[in-house]
Every structure is written in structure tokens, then in C-alpha cells.
Image (cartoon, helix red, strand yellow):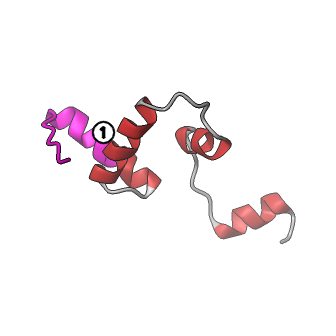
Amino acid sequence: MRLQFTVDENLGSKLQERAHELGFSVSSYVRHLIKQSFSNKPIGLVDKALQEPSELISLDEFRKQLDIG
């Protein structure tokens, strides 16, 4: 089945930004959201982690946090 959506620029920008953050194309991200909206099962830990905001850190900073120098 093929569906086509039209969204305003504000929502389109938000979709594009969020899809990029998660490593999805916009169309893949929208498919993911649609599938998720029909799911009755609890959100898994990975999905929950993906929904939380994240921060970018350098490899050196990550190593310091792990205390491996």
C-alpha cells in the first residue's frame, strides 16, 4: 500500500530533524511512528532509550567517563 502525507513546513522540519538524529530517512521515521502508534505492547528499553534526549561527547570524554584514559 502506498500512502502520501502532506505536512506544513514546521512539522516537516521537526520530522526531518528527529529522523536525522535517529539515523532514519524521513519516510522510514514516519513508518516507524505509524507502526509504533498501532503497537499494544510496552515500549522496549532500546526504543525508550532512543526517545530520550542524548548528548554528543568526544571519544576522549567517553573514555574519561569509563576511566580508561
Q: Label 1 is placed on what type of residue?
A: Lys
Q: Is 68 in front, or is 4?
A: 4
Q: Say whether residue 8 is left or right of residue 20.
A: left
Q: Secondary structure at mark 1?
A: helix
Q: Is 49 in front, or is 2?
A: 2
Q: Say whether residue 36 is left or right of residue 55.
A: left
Q: Is residue 58 magenta?
A: no
| Residue in the image at 42% along x and 30% along y | 38
Q: Is 35 in front, or is 54?
A: 35
Q: Is residue 11 magenta?
A: yes
From this view, report whether residue 44 is shown above or below residue 22.
Answer: above
The part of the image, by quadrant, that contains residue 4 is: top left
Residue most toward the top? 40
From this view, report whether residue 36 is shown above or below residue 26.
Answer: above
Counting from the top left corner in percent of width and height, residue 23 is at 43, 58
Q: Residues within 10 Å of mark 1 (few under 14, many from 20)?
A: few
Counting from the top left corner in percent of width and height, residue 49 is at 62, 43
The number of discs equals 1
| Magenta residue span | 1-17
Counting from the top left corner in percent of width and height, residue 2 is at 17, 47
Task: Quickly name the residue at label 1.
Answer: 14
| Residue in the image at 16% along x and 38% along y | 5
Residue most toward the right? 67
| Residue in the image at 53% along x and 27% along y | 40
